[in-house]
Image (cartoon, rainbow, N blue to C red):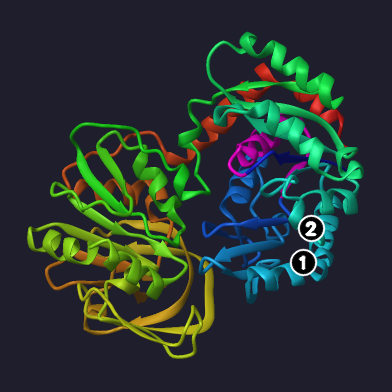
Amino acid sequence: MRAVMIQGTGSDVGKSMLVAGLCRAARRRGLSVAPFKPQNMSNNAAVTADGGEIGRAQALQALACGLAPITDMNPVLLKPETDTGAQVVVQGVRFASASARGFTEMKPALMAAVLESFGRLKSTHDLLIVEGAGSPAEVNLRAGDIANMGFARAADVPVILAGDINRGGVIAQLVGTQAVIDPDDAARVAGFLINKFRGDVSLFDDGYRFIETRTGWPGFGVLPWFQDAWKLPAEDALSLQAPAREGGVHIVCLALSRIANFDDLDPLMQEPGVRLTMLGPGRALPGDADLVIVPGTKSTRGDLAFLRAQGWDMDLIAHHRRGGHVLGICGGYQMLGRVVADPDGIEGPAGETAGLGLLDIATVMTAEKRLSEVEARHMDSGAAFQGYEIHIGQSDGPDRARPFAYVAGVAEGAISADGRVQGSYLHGMFRDDGFRAAWLDRFGVAARDDPYGEGVEQTLDALADHMEAHLDIGGLLGLAR
């Protein structure tokens, strides 16, 4: 087995996309390849084939490899619950909730689980493409590190360092990283690459040579901006960039502070008849919205307070009175009810919070977490679809007599008496082409003919072609050991 690791000079330099492209390129070379990320921080999680959860980026990378996602691909997942604390998921299962300092103290013990998962994957594949987290230049976090150089040295994996020229200062990013990290860590770096270049690449020739000369690291190329990156599921809500469109159905999604599993929106973004707005804090709900989506969240009561602080509670009530539609998904579904109670303090301080009152249901948070892939049938349209559950809490009340869907013959979700407010715990419904078409039809919009899944596959192929054209992929994969 061989492995190579992509680390970055910072967050959001494109590591996840680079790994996905390398995975697809290696697979097209006939290799059995799998992705691996020792530690991830994201509230956008995917349910795995072995009944756990991992970061959404690793699920996309698994798709690039032609594999079903499994928990070993991301053995430690941090899901932020507050500004200073997160749920810690280890090998797919909730392990603890910890403060930032508390997690730092856990890290040495978690290395065993990371190396165990790495060992299992490497025993069944020709090649692993490993993704780092954040940056190795965060030397204040080096002690006990399991995400970057700590892992690379423990597992004896060579590192390629990726810089983001779109941010500016890429020379300082790369040279500065070498300057501040431990010399033994710097020796682990086998080369660098430049990502997200716009314009004439030859204009950077002198800068590229300067980095090579100053660091002694060989360069593996400059990758121009990949124009179709928006077509791939994003792991960071800040990366969601809906194309500007005129007309069509206007769908507005509230960008909650702890938004989770927002890849529900990806298929809608690609529909020509949909104008999608991610509504950020401080902005009023547009008066021409046809549908408002209240998405999933890692902190239902916390985001209820956030939502009210933006004035969106009153906006939603006015939208509904004007005849508008509302869809709540998972935590968003819980918010639409009369009350959210957390008597045991599962998500934060024990207590209860008044909901938005648009659905006649009440929710109680429980310690049990539901993680499963499901096949369902939508009550309104009769459309069958596949989705997944990833939530805590149970909801019940009179509006449950009008379920959103049926799963294995059991009612799921709720619909208001007027039919214009619907809620469900099911994620991923819009990835199903039949359901998406049926949902858009109620707004008088025809869905595109080509399947969403085929579009993602084609974009992964295009990404691999793009990387092959501009990077030394053969040389990069040849570094793996």
Tag 2 residue: 145
Residue 102, picture quadrant: bottom right
281 versus 210 height, above or below? below
The quadrant the N terminus occupies is top right
Q: Residue at x 83, y 54 (%)?
A: 150
Q: Nearer the viewer, residue 465 or 278?
A: 278
Residue 17: x and y in percent read 60, 37
Image mark for residue 107: 1
- The magenta stretch spans which residues? 11-36
The residue at 87%/25% (across/down) is 216
**Can you say which quadrant of the picture contains the C terminus?**
top right
Where in the figure is residue 440, as x and y percent of width and height?
Answer: 24, 47
Identify the secondary structure beneath mark 1.
Answer: helix
Q: Does 34 lie within the magenta span? A: yes
Q: Pointer 2: residues within 10 angstroms few (<14), some, or many (20+)?
A: many
Q: Is residue 441 magenta?
A: no
The amino acid type of the residue labelled 1 equals Lys
Label 2 amino acid? Answer: Asp
Residue plotted at (90% across, 38% down) = 187
State whether residue 257 is above or below residue 475: below
Q: Secondary structure at mark 2?
A: loop
Q: Horizontal placement of 181 versus 18: left or right? A: right
Front position in the image: 328 or 377: 328
Residue at image position (37%, 37%) is 270
Residue 432, percent from left and from top = 40, 50
Instruction: Confirm or deny contact between disc 1 and disc 2 (CB under 8 A).
Output: yes
What residue occupies the far left of the structure in this picture? 322
In the rendered structure, the answer to whether residue 43 lies left or right of residue 118 reads: left
The residues tagged by marks 1 and 2 sit, at their Cα atoms, a distance apart of: 7 Å
Please tell me how crowded label 1 is: few (under 14), some (14-19), or many (20+) other residues with Cα within 10 Å.
Answer: some
Check the image and name the residue furthest to the bottom. 343
Q: From the viewer's perspective, is 166 left or right of 20? A: left
